[in-house]
Image (cartoon, rainbow, N blue to C red):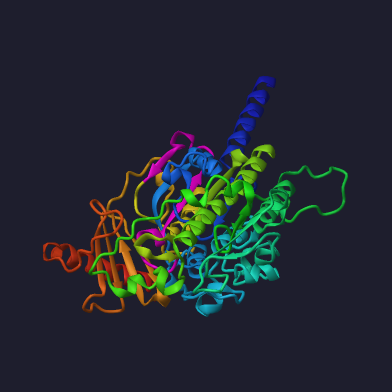
Amino acid sequence: MENQVNKKSNFLLTVIICLFFAIPETIAQKPNILLIISDDLNTRIGPYMNIDKHTPHLDRLANEGVQFTRTFCQYPICGPSRASFMSGLYPETNGVLNNNDQPGSYKKETPELAEHPSMAGFFRENGYFTARVSKIYHMGVPGGIERGEPGGDEPDSWDYAYNVMAPETLGPGKLELLSPKNTHYGSNFARMIIPDKLEETQADYMAATQAIAILENRAGKIPEDGTNKQRIKKDSPFFLAVGFVRPHVPLIAPENCFAPYPENEVVLPPLKIGENVPEQALRRQNGKVFGMNELQKRQTISAYMASVRFMDQQVGRLLHALDRLNLREETIVIFLSDHGYNLGEHDCWSKISLWEGSVRVPLIISVPGYESNYGTSCSTITELLDLYPTLTELCGFAGKEPEILQGKSLAGYLNGANPDNTDAYAYTVSYQGRDATLRTDRWRYTRWGENIEQENEELYDHNNDPEELVNLADNKDYKNVLDEMRIKFEYAKSKAASGLK
């Protein structure tokens, strides 16, 4: 009898244990997310250029994750690009086609999306503690950040939001205007070299410090005998979005960041412009917008690289904090930029253009548990709006994300399950959506204007012309390619505007 009782007890215990392990993963067991966004950063960083010791902390992150080598933004200026990847929707669907400093972002522009959660909002709705530090949606730099304003933030995304108030043009250094034709410090070129000892006065340093404080809060042990409330959603994983404003102009960095880039050693890109390039593609040429001489061009590139280096140092501080707090092995880390940036290619500068350098961005994703793929790269054409469905899948919410999302999950490229997809494409618009470009595995097709007109198209063969120097749109030998790209362009255009239909 006693043996029968023992057997029955053991059986019940076994059932209980099995049931325990069959319980779905609780919210407390979900991975944390650290999303790091750089402002106006092109792919002139170590992992993409093999530049030794330029961005050592991003080099480290690339070695601890997967580097996507052909990721493209959906609009090459800050506001629309950020609203796109945070909403998971193309700009034509979410309605954000300009920089807008009014809180609400896409929900304000398109009231039909008032109930559509942003990427961070989705995780907030599903139990995560979500926090924003500095610029995630559009925020005026330098003006808005000098005033400590939230800009065009989407407040439903966050349990906690922190706006950095930084000196920028008012900082502890000499502000040097480098673009005589443009005196607007949010869109011109200017530099400021600050003393190393005052680096903590700068926007990105302060943003990193606040982000580290949030990590400390989430990792800290709550006193057993305390009765006060120490943190919001105390047992929840976190979604922490940290915005660094460099290398957005004005180009400000400490002396140590300028030292490796002497202006007299800067090599300017060759000034090559095809004869049949549409005039619309050249609206950002130096003589039309900036008026820089050769020295000022060199100083601009030197200051840009210095700003990138300073931003990289802040990335390093965040990664070090994750290690120190034993959070790294349970935190997905993503690094990206909102769009690309021209530094003299085609004699074009800054953003807004539709060249490869204007729309291509860095994207690095590091996922704990996927170590077998660390240090690898993925060359499939991808879009920034793919990030939303990627994170929902990685965190166990596949099938629960909003059906309206227009991107595709990249999870299969992170765990090695997916081979490169040569049929993928990236679609990008600019100038309030009037002009657009389509990038496929081999070709880039750009159209300036709604319809096909004389001399308003570009076609580039990236297998043979990665710098986009030879426009093949009027070459009869490529008529079949042009016709095919026109069809693909119309399909992508229709899809990008179809989200609410």
Q: Residue at x 49, y 47 (%)?
A: 365
Which stretch did the figure color magenta?
351-378
The answer to which of 491 and 364 lies nearer the viewer is: 364
Determine if residue 399 is in view: no
The answer to which of 386 and 62 lies nearer the viewer is: 62
The answer to which of 77 and 137 lies nearer the viewer is: 77
Q: Which quarter of the rendered picture does the N terminus lie within?
A: top right
Residue 55 higher or lower than 92, as above or below: above
Residue 378 higher or lower than 497, as above or below: above
x, y (%) of residue 228?
A: 86, 53
Residue 298 higher or lower than 105, as above or below: above
Q: Is residue 361 rendered magenta in the image?
A: yes
Number of numbered discs present?
A: 0
Q: Residue at x 39, y 65 (%)?
A: 348
Please state if 446 lies on the left or on the right of 85 as rendered: left
The answer to which of 146 and 427 lies nearer the viewer is: 146
x, y (%) of residue 278?
A: 28, 73
Q: Residue at x 71, y 44 (%)?
A: 219
Determine if residue 380 is in view: yes
Q: Is residue 493 rendered magenta in the image?
A: no
The residue positioned farthest toward the left in the image shown: 477
**Residue 252 figure quarter:** bottom right
x, y (%) of residue 395?
A: 53, 49
**Residue 417 figure quarter:** top left
x, y (%) of residue 9?
A: 66, 28
Q: Which quarter of the rendered picture does the C terminus lie within?
A: bottom left
